[in-house]
Amino acid sequence: MNDKYDAIVIGAGHNGLVTATYLAKAGLKVLVLERREMVGGAAVTEDVFPGFKFDTGAHCINRLHPTVISDLQLAKHGLELLPLDPAVFSPGLDADHLLLWRTPEVTVDSIGQLSEKDAKRWNGFAALVAKATGLLESIYSTPPDVLSKKKKDVWELLKMAGRLRRLGKQDMTEVLRVLPMTAVELLDEWFENDLLKGTLGAVGITGIHQGPMSAGTAFLFLHHQVGAKQGVLRAPLRARGGLGGLSRALESAARSAGVEIRTNAWVERIIAEAGATSGVALVDGEEIAGRRVISNADPSRTFCGLLDPFNLDPDFVRRVRNIKFKGVVARVNLALGELPNFSCLPGDGPHLRGLISISPSLKYLERAFDDAKYGELSREPYLEAVIPSSTDPSLAPDGKHVMSILVQYAPYNLRDGEWDDAKREDLGDRVVTTLAAYAPNIESAILHRQVLTPLDIEAVFGLTEGNIYHGEMTLDQLFFMRPVPGWARYRSPVEGLYLCGAGTHPGGGVTGTPGYNAAREILKDSK
Amino acid sequence: MGQNTRYDAVIIGGGHNGLITAAYLARAGKRAVVLERRHLVGGSAVTEEIFPGFKFSALSYVVSLLRPDVIRDLQLARHGLELLPLESTITPLPNGDYLMRGADHDETRRELYRHSPKDAEAYDDFGKLMYHLAFAMKHILDVVPPNPTSMRPRDLMGLLRFGRHFLDLPPEQFYALCKLMTMSAADFLDEWFETEPLKATMSASGIIGTFLGVRSPGTAYVLLHHYMGEIDGVFRAWGFAKGGTGAVSEAIASAARELGAEIRTEASVEQVIVKNGKAVGVALESGEEIHGRVVVTGVDPKLTFLKLVEPQHLPSDFLDAIRRFKIRGSSGKVNLALGELPNLTCLPGKGPHLRGAISISPSLDYMERAYDDAKYGNFSRHPYMDIIIPSMIDPGMAPPGKHVMSIFCQWAPFELNGGWNDEQREAFGDAVVNTISEFAPNLKNAIIHRHVVTPWDMQETYGLTQGNIFHGELSLHQLFFMRPTHPWANYRTPLKNLYQCGSGTHPGGGITGASGRLAALEILKDW
Amino acid sequence: MLRGTPFHERTAPLCEGQNWRRWAGYLSASSYELVNDREYFAIRGASALIDVSPLYKYLIRGTDAERFLNRVLTRDVAKCDVHQVMYGPWCDETGKVIDDGTLQRLGEDSFRLTAAEPNLRWLADNAGGLRVTIEDDTDSTAALALQGPTSREILKSLSDADLDNLKYFRLAFARIRDIPVTITRTGYTGDLGYEIWVEARQAVPLWDALIDGGEPYGITPAGILALDMARVEAGLILIGVDYVPANRALIESRKSSPFELGLGWTVKLEKDHFVGRQALLDEWRGGPTWGFKGLEIDWNSLQKVYSEFGLPPELPQMTWRTSVPVYSGGKQVGYATSGCWSPTLKKYIALAHLQSNSAERGTRVEMEVTVEHQRKKAAARVVELPFFDPERKRS
């Protein structure tokens, strides 16, 4: 083939598109191959029921890398970010409710309704979080090669240690102390109100097979606050037109940078010989030659699915096989005839514009986890819902609404058998019942219901075990241990094969950071 | 002893660490006195004849990792320390089978093979890796933690040496160590093994003395402790002290006395006397004052800093940190006097398996369910138990033909719903006996006497705050330079001339004597 | 309790001195008679019957079996014909030997691999993503080695196999007095000989058949001590003695590559991939730093060393298995790991790891000998292995 590509990106997820665009901007000839008929990966908006558009994968953005936004001129390409305000609405079972706003003072007032003491401590807590996330952000570039004896790498490591020390004595130890803690321990040190602690703690368990009483959940809580304004915790964004709007902007940026994108192009395998890759083969038999192959798929799919194991040493394969996925998230999408009416805060108000978090206490979350631990769906699951149509009416027919709900815990591996239709419906029922306890009108408001089990999520989005982060975000699978120890710098043992997805550092969520870091490393190698 | 007595060092608490500190100080020519509240020395390492003719290691019941330096320096063999082998562990299973690991490699391999051929091999590979890691980590047990925020050359050098020590490990070992520090015992073992009782029994070491379940990250690294004995050059570092663990304390006390230290029992310290911002002695409950150039506390950090020292003498952020120090008791002890040996259904009769440990840990789920009870404030209905029959190893512990059984159980939370009382204590004892009876039905009839120690009793009788056997949980954020709190992990305290030598300091936990030794060496540096 | 092999019922009463040792968790006779000479000479002069059941045995089947084995072994398994047997080592990623054994190609997609140590986990790790099953066959298959000049005659008299046409390192499915067996023309003695693989429950009848039918040909049950002498003469390495398996070695320097064990001939670098290939290629290009050779200890020198004490040379009664320093020009250049007096060659021989520059054939070195509690050195000469290589082995 004459027109050999410089780089073939497998998967048009948001990270894949980011990487592709950066590479094209640096003058490389880039092809992106997407299995589905649309780009976006897990950041897509689909017409699930006529007239009702849902973000079927991720339904909000925690933080998009600011450099990516500006470098790719995403605004120019049509991206409009909608900050949710209030950020979170958390109903309690009694008359209580909690609202977290984008203005810290207002949040403090809201907390004050629940606990004077907690309201007073909010700013102190926010300051600690800001310090910790500041540190995390500073290490969210490419992880150093910790074991390298090369001067350059040692220097990088020392610089990182320096950043840590610059936090100052007190703060540094505090941050180091907090990182390995459990969400419960962290939050108990600061607050007394169950609803507040549950609402914050929920961030620490999202997407992982751990409860808030497991160590490392404090870290995940902090990870999701990286880039947040001080005092504005758990403040997600949406994109106009749904998350698909983000992907469309990314696609447009990619195309204008010269990236070629092919949808309905299902990669069957990565062609590799003698330890180097030379392209990919599609399911239909077509072979496409490329100097580099960049996989936006998760590491397990990449190394154990797309690549012939002969190209890898058994030790490396063992490491990949040991990556924990343990998907626990299911999705329920509801087409609603009317807005839910919450008993604790009746009527249509601003609260319906934020994330609706069903997390009345840390204990509630832990009990939800208890079920999953033994391979069962939570009897009372944690729910994170959004009603995008409340701020973006184009997503549903007039007067009607769409509500997407992230459900946890729905373990991928069930104790008694596999996920099937009956279990899927049971899951849907359980979610509706749970929600109805807070908003009794929900059942009658439902026009259509779509339920995605972890197995469905795996099938639709190609996420191993339905893990939304391409590998659990637990302490042992982060930083220089992500995706596997020794290979955290986006490269792989196969020459020319790179990773750019959420399975790499710094991990999951709609951030674009792995894609950005990967592009930089690939370009370094191209020099 | 008169009112005017002035010592070089006054040591609060005659636990094994306090005695060791006293012995080392005496060896350096200092006049040291140990003040013990009870009528016998040893703290948690005592042998008591609770019922006539039946002797029990009332709390701590095995000797683990007693530092070889201490054994050599204090010539403990000459002072009567004799360690007897405790070489096998049998895990009886509900299905009538069992898993047994013994001292003979071939036999253990074959037994594991019976359960899983792969595990039999993985066990050797695992052992080899652990050997290496234990070799690397052993270093940590014997050093004073460097202060990572200090700019003092000594700390910086310590930190650098420390970093190098680990970064120089072969990659495989370095990464395994990172995983050990961040993973749950269950997940770490899942990477290696498939046999449930093997994983459950091994994982147990990770949760002893913590308020975490085997699936909580941070519980993996304690797996190493089991392999550390091997490399210390001390045959049988894990063992049973002839005469019970009190014999260890007696040997140390004897060494201390010979070196010139004074030991006073029934001398309960009420307060640390502070003059001009320095600790100058202690006041006993009797009103007697004992003065010393330094005061060393062998009791736990909460008891020391929140009870024995008046708050105005300590900085408030330090007190905050001590208040935050996690010291939740989670274990109980049941001591039984038996008329006959328990007859295990899975392996009937009096066999060598009764000379080792019997572990009630049939599966990871069993362990998790035991933990679930505790999470919500109940004692485990079916606890994890580590059982030994000391009279099988040392016949002197019971009248001829009779036996004593020592049962360590977890979880028994200090903060029990409704609080501990006599009724709850017996209910807990019943849960323990009933659970064991499922595996050894004759047990109930064999019991002559029963002695149940709840965390509450541990606090009241043995002075362990909240009944925590390790003077503070061994969770990641409370280890090394954070034990008990940064920057006071170097055995000093914010109060001048007050030192700490108990298990609440690095490295903490078990009868190691490391804290006591390192504290003494630090005190002597300041002299 | 150690367990007996499937032949234990028969071997136990024969073991006159209760002289047992451990072999992979089994009881294995060191020697049956009180003196092991007769057992050794049976190997070289008649036929010895040796229970080798404790060997680990894995059945590997599936359409990817060849591909899989080609990935693990250094030999080119594609060149192994059906009913052929191949000997070779397998290595870790850094090209250090994990174990060595024989591979029997039972059919197009069906193999039996023997190993000295358990290797199921390693094999399974390498089989990820391949259509292959690995079954540990160790307990259900018993094995006997029938070794010695009369072994062919014995089998001919007892079995239906075409033994005259069964070439060296080939196998045949056959019946021995109605007992179905696999006969391989292999062994660990360097002599004419066979190994017979049988279902464990048929072990005792097989033993009886061989003893009965072999009697006219001088069949003699032999223990490990006799075998050990024969294998040293044959220059065959023993795991755990002559090398430390890479996955058990605690430090890097204890590991050996195939080149360093004299197994360079088994390393097929032209194969496009196998575990350890890159490292072995690098080593081959640079030249290995160690060699594995034979030492013949100079009799006169040995005599001289002993005569200082007024003694004649005292020869080892059995194969020693300790590490003995080897010197050249006063500096240590290697170490011998096994040695014995060869009754057949009438020489004191040893197997030794030697630094490459001292490993040339004919190099004069010195081996340490301890005489009357004092360390002395005896002159020795480096020779190629094997020491003993009779025509009949292959013919």
Image: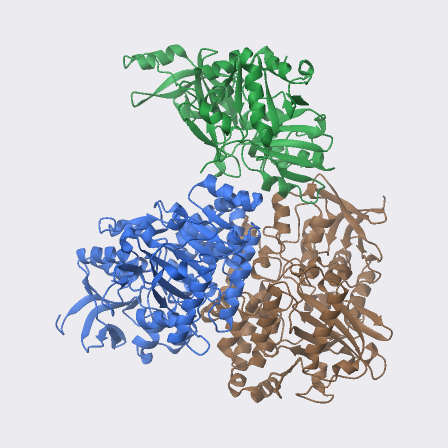
Chain colours: A brown, B blue, C green
In the orientation shown, which residue stands out farthest toward the right? A50
Q: Is residue B149 visible?
A: no
Percent position (x, y) of residue C84? 68, 24
Q: Is residue A454 above or below residue A269?
A: below
Q: Is residue B510 above or below residue B297?
A: above
In screen coordinates, is C211 left or right of A519? left
C101 and A63: which one is in front?
Answer: C101
| Number of numbered discs on residues | 0
B317 and C121: which one is in front?
Answer: C121
Which residue is drawn at the image coordinates 48% and 72% (left, top)? B378
Q: Quadrant of the N terminus of chain B?
A: bottom left
Percent position (x, y) of residue A507? 64, 62
A474 and A209: which one is in front?
Answer: A209
Q: Is residue A372 above or below residue B162?
A: below
Q: Is residue C330 visible?
A: yes
In screen coordinates, is C168 left or right of B72? right
Please tell me in which quadrant of the rendered image residue C66 appears. top right
Which residue is drawn at the image coordinates 51% and 48% (left, top)? B173
